[in-house]
Image (cartoon, rainbow, N blue to C red):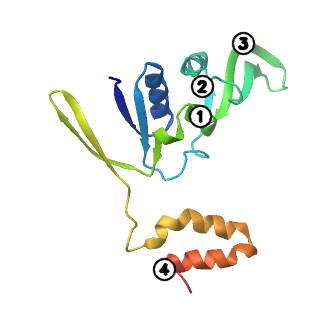
Amino acid sequence: MNRRAIIIGGSTSGLFSAVFLRQFGWDVDVYERSRVELVGRGAGITGHPELFQVLEASGAGTKDLGVEVPKRIALDREGRITAERPLRQIMTPWDGMQRLLRAGIDDARYHLGWNFERVDQNGDGVTGAIFRRPRQNRRHPGRCRWHSIKRASAAGPRDKARLCRLLHLAGRAQ
């Protein structure tokens, strides 16, 4: 019987966990609260040798991860180099690493839009985890459509009819 794991949270640490557990033969599903892929978020990451080793070991690799910086230099006030230190680092946006790791998880095993509620367990271990999809906010139905409204409004005048339709559905028609 294969062992099964459920990872709660589809960010980098959840994806690292899922990728490594899969390498050890586990069946893994990742549940993420966000309804959309976690890209375009987070700050920049400075990669160090330990991070490269873990990415290589995970199978994600470091190809196209970011911009490589081979060394650090110190300059004086006139711009002359006063010291150099070899220090290989890769500067990457957070979502660059997210995309690399996400590529190692099948779409059928990465579930967007699920909130974790509780876990049921007994003396033998966990018997079930309960997730739910958030219901639409009935007081403010437009909140669920906010990203679509923003996309339509940024698209230009040709999508004005679509924007008006979305605004009407959101209860904000004027």
Give the Cα separation between the discs numbered 4 and 1.
Answer: 38 Å
Residue 86, disc: 3
Give the Cα separation between the discs numbered 3 and 1.
Answer: 31 Å
In what quadrant of the picture does the C terminus appear? Answer: bottom right
Circle 2 crowding by C-alpha within 10 Å: few under 14, some 14–19, many from 20: many
In this view of the protein, which residue sits in the foreground, 65 or 77? 65
Residue 71, disc: none
Q: Which residue is mark 1?
A: 103
In what quadrant of the picture does the N terminus appear? Answer: top left
Whichever of callouts 3 and 1 sits on the residue coming sooner in the sequence is: 3
Occupied quadrant, residue 162: bottom right
**Closer to the camera: disc 4 or disc 3?**
4
Mark 4 residue type: Gly
Mark 3 residue type: Pro
Residue pushed farthest bottom? 174
In this view of the protein, which residue sits in the foreground, 21 or 150? 21
- Which type of secondary structure does the marked residue at label 1 adopt? loop
Q: Looking at the image, do the residues carrying marks 4 and 1 touch, with CB atoms under 8 Å apart?
A: no
Circle 4 crowding by C-alpha within 10 Å: few under 14, some 14–19, many from 20: few
Whichever of callouts 4 and 1 sits on the residue coming sooner in the sequence is: 1
Whichever of callouts 3 and 2 sits on the residue coming sooner in the sequence is: 2
> At 40% across and 66% down in the image, what residue appears?
136
- Which type of secondary structure does the marked residue at label 3 adopt? strand
Q: Which residue is mark 4?
A: 171
Q: Which residue is mark 2?
A: 60
- Which type of secondary structure does the marked residue at label 4 adopt? loop
